[in-house]
Amino acid sequence: MTEVKELKVEDIKKQADEIRCPVQRSLFYIKEFLAGPMCGRCLPCSLGSYEARIRLENIVEGRGNESDLVAIKRIARDMLEGSMCKKGKDTARFILEWMEKDAFEDHIHGRCHDLECKAFIEYFIIPEKCTICGLCKDVCKFGAIHGEKKKPFMSGYLPFEIRQKRCTKCGECIKVCPEGAIIIIEAVSKRPVAVEQVEDRLDSAEALK
Ligand code: SF4
Ligand code: SF4
Ligand code: SF4
């Protein structure tokens, strides 16, 4: 049987610190913490960290609400008080420290200022810039782009549109649009954000998963 190597909390923390977004950082930390062998000697840690992971996933995936925040804080405080070893107490301390930032509240209201959470951005086609060439639709593997490619000498075509529910935010369409008509916007405010900045951050956040 393959033995699961137990990482030290300091090592997990060091890796987690590479992630800018405090919510993503907490989720990464908890996942790594749970990936190691869990001794299960005390409840706040063994049960609480599973629940914390589910609550943190809700938040980074855009389904979070105030009750998730309250529950994560309660779990971390219980772990800090009731954990029987340093590992559990340190975990609680890190989560509480990261929760001091406004980022957790902001996520509940649809914002990730660090642009590392896919749930809070959208890919968007600027209608005025779209020449209806269809290249983006050809490259989208998820059927997320709606529109009919323009035929020469015919009129009545509408600009292409992205169906947000199908879009996985893979970024392939931006690469092929010859008009620069596809941009990334913050979902809640519809404010454009720098494409390079988002892609770099999403890539580094993905790499750590
Ligand atoms: S706090 Fe320590 S002793 Fe308690 S379950 Fe977690 S790892 Fe085990
Ligand atoms: S690739 Fe660009 S210009 Fe062509 S249909 Fe898509 S958005 Fe419009
Ligand atoms: S980001 Fe990816 S999934 Fe979304 S519309 Fe563009 S190609 Fe399709």
Image: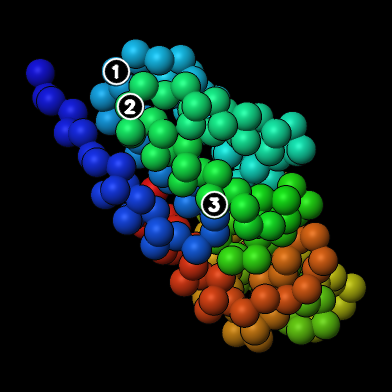
Image spot of residue 115 (x, y percent): 60, 65
Which of the image's four quarters has the N terminus?
top left
Of the numbered discs 3 and 2, the one sitting upstream in the chain is: 2
Image spot of residue 143 (x, y percent): 63, 51
- Say what secondary structure mark 3 lies in: helix
Q: Nearer the viewer, residue 42 or 147?
A: 42
Q: How many marks?
A: 3
What residue sits right under mark 3 in the picture? 98
Image spot of residue 180 (x, y percent): 65, 84
Of the numbered discs 1 and 2, the one sitting upstream in the chain is: 1
Which numbered dot is residue 206? none
Q: Which amino acid does label 2 sit on?
A: Cys
Q: Which of 176 and 110 is in front in this view?
A: 110
Horizontal side, residue 113 vs residue 39: left or right: right
For residue 180, above or below residue 52: below
What residue sits right under mark 1 in the picture? 39
Within 8 Å: ligand 1 and the Cβ of disc 1?
yes
Horizontal side, residue 139 vs residue 123: left or right: left
Of the numbered discs 3 and 1, the one sitting upstream in the chain is: 1
What residue sits right under mark 2 in the picture? 85
Q: In which quarter of the image is residue 133?
A: bottom right
Image spot of residue 194 (x, y percent): 62, 79
Q: Which amino acid does label 3 sit on?
A: Trp
- Mark 1 Cα-neighbour bin, 10 Å: few <14, some 14–19, many ≥20: few
